[in-house]
Amino acid sequence: MEKIYRTILCIDLKSFFASVECVDRNLDPFTTPLVVANPNQKGAITLAVTPYLKAKGIKGRTRLYEIPKDISYQIVPPRMKRYIEMSKKVVQIYLDFVSSNDLHIYSIDECFLDITTYLSYYKKSDIELAEIILQTIEEKTGLTATCGIGPNLFLAKVAMDTEAKKEKNGIAKWEYQDVETKLWPITPLSKVWGIGPRMEKRLNALGIKTIQDIACYNKQKLKQKLGVLGEELWEHAHGIDDAVIANFDKNPQEKSISHSQVLLRDYTIEKIPLIIEEMLEVLTRRLRLEHQEASLLGFGISYSKQVGGGFYHSVTLEQGSNLTKDFYPYCLTMLESYYEETMPIRKVSISLGKLAPKIGTQLNLFESLEQKEKEEQVERVMDEVKEKYGKNSLLHASSLLSYSTIKERNMKIGGHHE
């Protein structure tokens, strides 16, 4: 893959929720011990803490009882409507500098801006323009921000995550020549965007402790062990990321099918694989009934409202499929990579895109035609049984577990009881 040379800004609003609460109270978040959390919930997880508390070693996401007793602080309940309002105000500031085609909203407090074509227009260097944008944010909203600058989204993001907050002006710039000196030494691996604690453990089990270890690992072997995400990790370890903001969402009308499920209670991560499998069975059955297959998988998790946040990522399969087993491992890998430890899960979302008519059986190097055809035949027979006798006529034994939702979902139409 060739290196792209853009000028990307990754801007993050510092301790966003806590800072908004301070701004609204005319308080300085750098001198105020304030925590955003549900004060009435036992063992509540903090949604955010001020930079003042972070400087004392308090993590942004921690349980209230884990904050040392000798540290006094103020607790305020979260106000998501207010945070969304402030986030939109900041986004509008970005749009005063770049067009919507060059802006990617990554989360409520973080955005990417492609300023490649704007530097000559503003007659500013990348650092100068970043400084102006950060100053404008502070002047118009009272919020402070940090910024990473890089030739692609990945390097800009990692520069922001690992270095910008240490700089006096809140800005860090990385080039491709910085990969070996700045990116490779990073450890633990979970400090790097896209590597969660669970993925870190899997990599550690392979003897991989630093980003340099990933870069020096055989690319094909890493892909065999971790799938497409293994290949992406290897490319990121070399500072490579070919994503271009202007190319995002070019086919919003492209046909796809999706399934999202709001769970009746907060789930722990151990129970989510079963939910994923059940949801994929619903989606792949629909594909088979329509004689379609998909090659794009989207997977997302939303945390409990008391905590907020979550993630959504997609991956393109090497070949289309309409079998649950072909999508399931990718969902598990993304779950392990992006899930934040101990966070309560309340919603699971899965989408299958890049649909195309199924016109034959495609094989990879590790399966036989006989094996593939047998798997497809089993699925067809199961589909026929369910079509004739009802969706709950044939279920896995795991569907009898207390936290399974498939039996209840099968009794509904469009998420509602018939």
Image (cartoon, grey):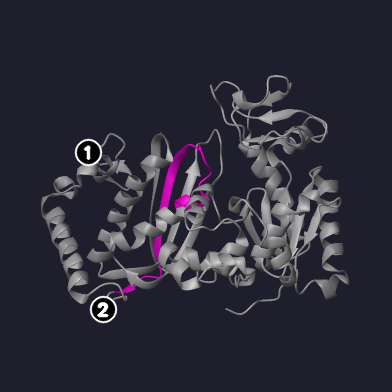
The residue sitting at 15% across, 56% down in the picture is 387
Q: Between disc 1 and disc 2, whose residue precedes? A: 2
Can the viewer see residue 91? Answer: no
Say whether residue 318 is left or right of residue 173.
Answer: left
Can the viewer see residue 279? Answer: yes
**Magenta stretch holds residue 356:** yes
Residue 115 lies, with reference to residue 188, above or below; the image says below
Residue indicated by mark 1: 400
Mark 1 to mark 2 CA distance (whole Å):
36 Å
Q: Are marks 1 and 2 in contact (CB under 8 Å)?
A: no
> What's the magenta region?
335-357
The residue sitting at 36% across, 70% down in the picture is 355
Q: Which mark, residue 359?
A: 2
The residue sitting at 82% across, 42% down in the picture is 142
The residue sitting at 41% across, 55% down in the picture is 331
Describe the element under mark 1 as helix, strand or loop.
helix
Q: Which mark, residue 77?
A: none
Percent across and percent down for residue 295 are 39, 69
Residue 351 lies, with reference to residue 24, above or below; the image says below
Percent across and percent down for residue 25 are 79, 29
Can you tell which quarter of the image residue 183 is in?
A: bottom right
Of tags 1 and 2, the one toward the viewer is: 1
User: 173 or 386: which is nearer to us?
Assistant: 173
Percent across and percent down for residue 90 are 73, 51
